[in-house]
Image: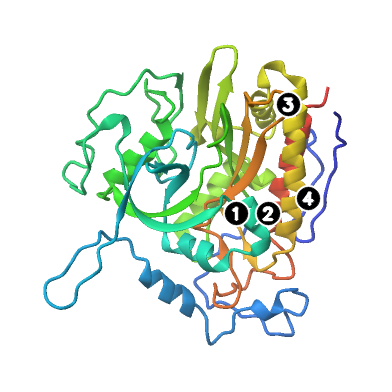
Amino acid sequence: MMMEETQLQFASVVLGPKDNGIIVAECTPSTSSNKSKSVMRSNEECLVCPHQDNVLSPKKKQNIIDNKSSSIQTQTPSETNGTNKQKKRKIFEAIPFSDQVGGHSPCARLKEDPSIVCKPAGSREVLFYETFLPDELKEFLPAFHGVKLVRLSTPYGGETVTNDKKSPLASLTSTPPPLLVKSATMNEEDGSDTSSDENDDEYAWYTHCFKRHLSKGNMNVMECLLLENLTDEMTKPCIMDLKMGTRTFKDNATEKKRIRALEKAAETTTAGMGLRVCGIKLYNKVTGKYSFEDKYIGRKLTQNTIKDTFQQFLGLNGDVDLRERVVSILCERIHRLRFVIASLPLHRFYSTSLLLIFDACPKDPKTAVADLRMIDFANSQCYVRGGDEIPSDVDLSHPDEGYLLGLDNLELLLKQTIQP
């Protein structure tokens, strides 16, 4: 199956010539802080927007966000003395999730229902799922099953963890299983290389996130989004986690975070291509083993070397027919997602992830099983009624063009894996 390569143009992102088939963005994001007062568009200025009725009025601003955020603070349920008693909430048990390949927080599977993934929730992300998620976007997200208190289990069967700041990792004493592949690691704050002799295993990223979470003095009982487990029905799921868009910080980010995010974008494929590899889990039929790559390896990829990464990810041990079917499914999903994103000018999907998933050993060899879903909305912006204020540098007559650039380059990278 052959697919013709296409090049798409946008209104606000200036696209340069193709570099070896990749669309390159030549725009430079502003480094200025949003400390100045946000500018609200008048009704006349927003007439071009099909969602005009949803634009936030200056008087309401962020009433909903303030009210919602205060009502979903993460805390362990308890009863107070006297007449003012809090109702105890059920705590659900969860077990490590082997198909997590990216993100900052440890994701787990619900113990009583492994078809549900528990993702630690911040107030903004909960608000997005409960209030601001557009209906037309729902088919591109894991199904949402509410918010619950969840107790995450320690990797490798360690003891129950508390929030003892003196020894937050004391329970992680069990010996991990044999490790499979080496992975580069870097300091989270400054990006410096801290590679060691430790290798990855199938729970490597869960373990990394779990230790990081506890090292900050957090508890292992937390508020979690309950989401559909996208790999539950797959025999040998393969996953690639992509951070999408040319911008990765939200409107109220500090100057320090803005500068660091822009530097990281310029040093990686984010600024020029609108996407960056943040993690990979890949099954090899010949060896019968999985291999893994984390976000630190993804940061080292360039516009040229990222092509090789996609070739390896979709190699499927030389099964050309299966590869073409998987690529066809993913490209069709990209087309539909692009149409939806282009129709949502009041949303910006900063720093969200896009998961590419396929089954390396489908139950029916003649049927390809593949999918594409969006996750991680903590930094997304919603300029709808009751949502975020509109900064002066946001043009609501255009959608999130940095995200659209990433989708266009993703389609080109996928097509290149099946071209002779």
SS assignment at label 4? loop
What's the residue at 64%, 47% (across, down)?
A: 271
Name the residue carrying label 4: 15
Asked whether the residues under the numbered discs 3 and 4 touch, taking CB atoms below 8 Å apart as contact, a structural biologist would say no
Name the residue carrying label 3: 323
SS assignment at label 1? loop
Q: Nearer the viewer, residue 157 or 19?
A: 157
Asked whether the residues under the numbered discs 1 and 3 touch, taking CB atoms below 8 Å apart as contact, a structural biologist would say no
| On screen, residue 308 above or below 163 | above
The image's mark for residue 402 is: 2
Cα separation between marks 3 and 4: 30 Å
Cα separation between marks 1 and 3: 31 Å
Name the quadrant containing residue 208: top left
Cα separation between marks 2 and 1: 7 Å
Report whether residue 294 is seen: yes
Label 3 crowd (10 A; few <14 / some 14-19 / many >=20):
many
Residue 86, x across and y down, in percent: 23, 70
| On screen, residue 26 above or below 114 | below
Q: Nearer the N terminus, badge 2 or badge 1? A: 1
Amino acid, disc 1: Arg
Q: Nearer the viewer, mark 1 or mark 3?
A: 3
What's the residue at 75%, 51% (across, down)?
A: 336
Q: Nearer the N terminus, badge 1 or badge 3? A: 1
Q: Nearer the viewer, mark 3 or mark 4?
A: 3
Residue 298, x across and y down, in percent: 56, 34
Name the quadrant containing residue 87: bottom left
Asked whether the residues under the numbered discs 2 and 3 touch, taking CB atoms below 8 Å apart as contact, a structural biologist would say no
Q: Is residue 372 left or right of residue 336?
A: left
What's the residue at 70%, 23% (across, down)?
A: 365
The image's mark for residue 247 is: 1
Asked whether the residues under the numbered discs 2 and 1 touch, taking CB atoms below 8 Å apart as contact, a structural biologist would say yes
